[in-house]
Amino acid sequence: MGQTMAMLVKLKKMHPKSVIPNYAKIGDAGMDLVITSIINENKEDITYGFGLSMEIPEGYLGLIFPRSSIRKYDLLLTNSVGVIDSGYRGELQATFKKSGPHLYEIGDRGAQIVILPYPQIEFVEADELSNTERGKGGFGSTGI
């Protein structure tokens, strides 16, 4: 397999301890985001700042996901996946629901970002849709 060309994304460090995201291993899709601050915390939620802002190119978006290590913590990303639009220039951050005392700390890798292209969609109203094997079946209709 050949190598793919790297896409250049402008990045601004907003904190002295900001860490530029990178891939931990060859073939990784996500790049870890390191926590530089606690932006807000209350009884139920905690919002972490990653001390970075970026200029995602038009036609792309950033998706912020929990890391697989989240299972070791008493946290749940509140919006499941964060969407960073190409026009956003603020600090990357993530808010988690707290379910116990074991939380991320400043300096921990608290999330990961994946940057992907997306198509521009134009909907076309139709009276009928094509038939498929699945049809209208949903919510477990495939037997799982």
Image: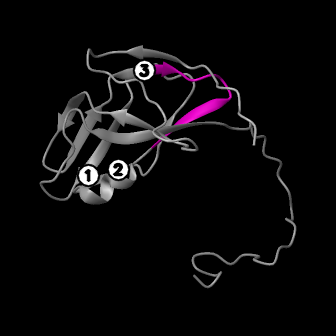
Name the amino acid type tagged 2: Thr
Circles 1 and 2 in contact, beta carbons < 8 Å? yes
* Residue annotated with mark 3: 53
Question: Range of the magenta residues?
Answer: 53-64
Q: Which mark is residue 23?
A: none
Determine whether, in the image, residue 50 is placed left or right of residue 128.
left
> Does residue 33 lie above or below 81 as drawn?
above
Q: Which residue is nearer to you in this view: 25 or 76?
A: 25
Q: Quadrant of the N terminus?
A: top right
Percent position of residue 12, x then y = 42, 14
* Residue annotated with mark 2: 78
Percent position of residue 94, x then y = 34, 39
Q: Which residue is drawn at the image coordinates 55% and 30% (left, top)?
A: 85
* Residue annotated with mark 1: 97
> Does residue 18 lie above or below 67 as drawn?
above
- Is residue 143 located in the magenta-colored stretch of the structure? no
Q: Quadrant of the C terminus?
A: bottom right
> Can the viewer see residue 28?
yes
Determine whether, in the image, residue 134 is placed left or right of residue 70.
right
Q: Which residue is nearer to you in this view: 6 or 57?
A: 6
Q: Which residue is drawn at the image coordinates 38% and 22% (left, top)?
A: 52
Distance Cα–Cα, label 2 vs label 3: 20 Å
- Is residue 60 located in the magenta-colored stretch of the structure? yes
Distance Cα–Cα, label 1 vs label 2: 6 Å
